[in-house]
Each structure stands twice: as C-alpha cells, then as structure tokens.
Amino acid sequence: MSLKLPDGKAGRFLLTAAPWLFFLALIVLWELVCQVFSLPEYVLPAPSAIVDAFFNVEFSRWMTHLWATLRVALMGFVVSILVAIPIAIAMMRSELLSRTLYPLLVVIQSTPVVAVAPLIIVLMGSDDPSRVLITCLLTFFPLVVSTATGINETPAELIELSRSLDAPTRRETWQIRIPYAIPHIFSGLRVAITLAIIGAVVAEFVAAEEGLGYFIQFSTSFFRIPQAFAGLFFLAVVSLLLFKSVQWAQQIFFPWSLPRK
Amino acid sequence: MRKGFTRSFLFAASLAGGLMSQGALAADKVTYQLDWLPGGDKSPVYVGVQQGFFEAEGLEVSIASGRGSTDAITKIATGQADIGSADIGALMAAKAQDDSLPVKAVYSIFNQAPHAFFTLKKNGIAELTDIDGKKVATSPFTSSNAFLPLVLKGNGLAEDAVKLTKADPGALGPMLMNGGTDAIIAWVTNIALFADQAKATGNELVVLPWSDAGLELYSSSVVASDKFLSERPDVAKRFMRAFDKSLKFTHDNPRKAAEDLHSMVPEVDVDVVTAQIGDTMKLVVNSVSDRDGLGALTEERVALTWDWVAQAEKLEKGVLNPETVIDRDLLEAL
C-alpha cells in the first residue's frame, strides 16, 4: 500500500472526511444507477424516493416505532449486562461452574434465535418480556465471553502480589480483575448493543404491533419498498448512534481504559 | 434520564391502575387475533371498534397482528387471544394432526378460495389451461401451494405441469413485472396492489381465480378458543353480533372502513385499502352468501372444504370429522 496521506492539516481533514465522502459517493452512484437504468421502485428504490418516503411518514409515527424498538433493545441490553457480567465473574472464580455453564452458553449461542423466537412468543406471550428475552439471547453471549476473557487476562504477577498481601477475593476481583477487564467488557458491549437492535427487530418480526422492524415488515406487505428502505436506514442510524454512545460512555467514564494514541 | 424514567414509570403505574379500576365495572375485554398484518382484508374488526359496534355490545376489543394462520391458531389455542381470523383449512389440518386442539370455527369470512394465478396480458395466459409448461412463482409458506396440484389436476393438466419457483412474497410482483416468471400465485385480495405495479410498468394484469377453476371451499374464517366459547358464551355472542354488523358495514362503506383502519393503523393508505376491500368483498358477499347467508358454515361446504384440504395436505379423509371443528351456536344466535 503506497497510498500516502498528505501531511498536516489536509491529511487530518481527509482522514475525518473520507468515510463521509465515500458514503456520499455511494449514494450518488446508487441514485445514478436507478435513474440511468430507470429501475422500478419495487426493484431498487432510488435514494431520493427513500428520502421522500421517509418524510411521507408522520414524525410522531417514526417516534412511536423508534421508541418501541429502542425500549426492547435497551431493556434487553441492560438485562444482559446484569446477567452476563456476574456469570462471567462467577465462572472465573469456580472451575466447576465454568465447566458446567460454558457448554450450555455455547448451545444457547449456536441456536438460531430466529427459529426459537416463535416458540418463546407462544410460551411467554407476545408482550415485552418475551421480546426482551429474545434480545437477551443474542446479546448476552458476547458479553460473557468478553468479560471472562478480560478477567482471565489480568497479569498473573498482579494476582500473585494481591494474594501475597492477603487481599480478599472480593477486592482482587473489584480492584484488579474488573479494571483489567474493562476494555474487553466494552468491546463486548459494542458488539452487544448492535445485536440488541437486531434482537428487537427479530422479535418484532414474530409478534409486535409497533416498532421499526414491524414497520419494515408492514411496508413490504403493502409493497411499499421505498418506505421499507426508509425504515431500514432509520434503524441503521439508530444502531450506529447506540454503538457510538457505548464508545462515548467509555471515553467519559473509563478514559484510562482506552488505548493510548 | 433518571427523572424521565421515574416520570414514565409513574405514568405507566397510574395508567395501569386506571385501566384496572375501570375494567372492574365496565366493558368485557376481548382480544382478537389477526392471522396477518393489518390490511384491507382485515378491516371489519377495526370498523367494529371505530364505529362503536363493539362498544354498543359492552365490549372492549383489542386487536393483535399475526404472522400466518398457524400462528393465529396457536395464539388462540394457548389463550393469548380469545377469538380471531384464520384459514379454516389450516384449522382442519391442525385438528387432524392433534385432535385436542381447543379451537373452533364459528363464522366464515371468505366463502371462496382466495388463491389465483396472476399474470400479464402479454404473457398469453388467458385461461387456466394455458398455464401448462409456464414458469410460476409463489411464496414458500402460502397455503395456496398445497392446492396447486389439485387445481392443475382438476383442469386436466399434470400435477407438475408448471415450473414452480419459490420466492419471498414481496419479490413476486417484481418478478412478474420483470419477466422473471410468467405467472405468480397470490390472493385475489391483493389484485389492486399488483394491478398498480403492472400499470407502473405499462402492463395489464390478468387474474385467474382458482375458485373459477373448481376450487370450492371456505377459507378465512372467524375461529375461537373452546375456553372463550364455553366460559364466556354471552360475550362471544355479543362479539359475533357486532362483528357481523362490522362486516356488513365494511361491504357497504368500503371507503369509510378504510378510513377506520387508517385511524387505528396510520401507516395504511386509504386509497389502497379501499381497493383491497373491494377485492376482498367478492370473497365474502357473492352467490354463495346469497344462497347460504353471510358467515354461514353449511355442512355440505364444510365437508367439501375438508375434501380439498385432506387431498391437498395428503391426509386420510377419515382422520377428521370436519364437523368437529365447527361451532354454529354463535351463527344461530345472530
């Protein structure tokens, strides 16, 4: 790769602007393809048609659907954190527990949630709890794995030191292992937050009366493809913002855990 | 954030409290389960809510969307809903496999098969026998697929006379318009939607309903759980009285019905839904309903339906007495 950035200000500008410019170029190309080949809307709607469709839906409806999806995704995310991190800590402390639980966790993770979702709805009803469970099934495994990895990667000499000083396990966990695990936990959280949105959408595909996933499904049932795309993009933007929020949370609350630039 | 959360929690709590105290003295609650997403063909129950027909019977009806007949039947069987709409054929097939399924059909909505071939005029398929050797696309999970071989056989064609491909329901229209397939299988309730697509590409849509080709059966019906029927028979009676009224209102005032649906499901377009209702009503009010009455489930046609379903699902005819999935008490009380 001999692509070299220009030095100084221009280089930095290019670095920030590149993703945006690339994205813009893609959109322009897409619009051009649609116009030049005059593709019908239901095959591939042009970006301009998608923007039109977006503004044709009332803002309050967008907010209703957004809130429905966000609510489930965030509840699932929070429940996952509350479940996954203690499980990871417990598994680190006890080999028996680790050996007992790990296979089960892998089984849960390898089961396609899309296939299980209808069964969950039948068992638990078509309200929020089942949607949150579906979301948790997707989000909690990466959290357990990343937390466990982080905890296990604590330098052995620090653990030895704390043991030689007779520090109780609780302090060893909270003051040495967890801080060391923070970067790992956050990379798990970043994966989990996007999975939470996917989980909420999967749940909405199976049973829901509102939400962005439901909205997309509903739009296609009326062959309103541009509107479905508008929903899709909205969903992607929300997902991106949530992903960013996790990064911001790390920057604000755990700045020391970020790699030094 | 915290304040917002507290506020919304308080709001939710007061709302729940309000609902509970109200429920104690007021309307009987009924949950109606749709077998698909809201659309023109599902509008009568929305009409009942908006026009106050349910309220006049002292009912508070909530509507849940579904994802297919089997989904709706399962939710009604497990008590998540009291009553709803589902294909009577799906109910018969389910009952044939599990006799204990606690769900019964109480009212027919479609007294004709909704399945049809959709094609374009330029493809030269003017009648059903012209389909011989053509490419046909269908969606993977539609109940139509099971009836296809029977319809072909009934018209003197081989069971594999067409080259069948399966695709997502949303892709069928585009495939037809692009020439990716010669015909598609869809429901006549969506004629307006496909006709629009055809017009947009400068084509003319041709519809060949399977009911014209000899497929005589009940299809979408109102089905209810045994529990609802036995524990709250009076509520069930009042519900069906209002539903019957709603269906008639929908037939007489398609545009008003579409507006009623729109006011509860703002995403639907009133024009599109009005057209859908027009297409749908041909399956509801027709020569069969003129002869037997609206909603009727005659013994003869129920038996005929089971004949078709048993053949389509490759089930022994003897495994089910089709009368066991029917409950006519509500119809008689109308």
Image (tube, helix red, strand yellow):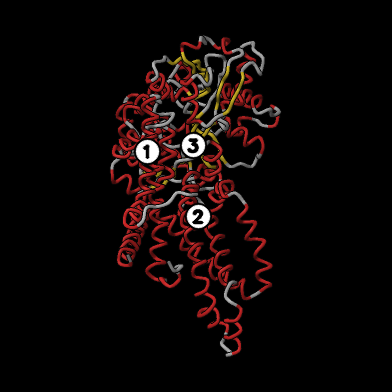
Kindly identify the residue that appears in the image at 68 percent across and 67 percent down: A100
Q: Secondary structure at mark 2?
A: helix
Report the Cα–Cα distance between label 2 and label 1.
Answer: 31 Å
| Residue type (three-letter) at the residue carrying disc 3 | Asp
| Residue type (three-letter) at the residue carrying disc 2 | Thr
Q: Quadrant of the N terminus of chain B?
A: bottom left
Q: Is residue A192 left or right of residue B266?
A: right
Q: Which mark is residue A169?
A: none
Q: Secondary structure at mark 3?
A: loop
Q: Is residue B176 left or right of residue A241?
A: right
Where residue B16 appears, x then y in whole percent? 36, 58
Kindly identify the residue that appears in the image at 32 percent across and 61 percent down: B8
Where residue A96 appears, x then y in whole percent? 69, 72
Mark 2 — residue?
Answer: A135
Report the Cα–Cα distance between label 1 and label 3.
Answer: 38 Å
Where residue B224 appears, x then y in whole percent? 51, 39
| Residue type (three-letter) at the residue carrying disc 1 | Ile
Between marks 2 and 3 in the image, the one whose residue lies nearer the viewer: 2
B68 shown above or below A238: above
Q: Which mark is residue B35?
A: 3
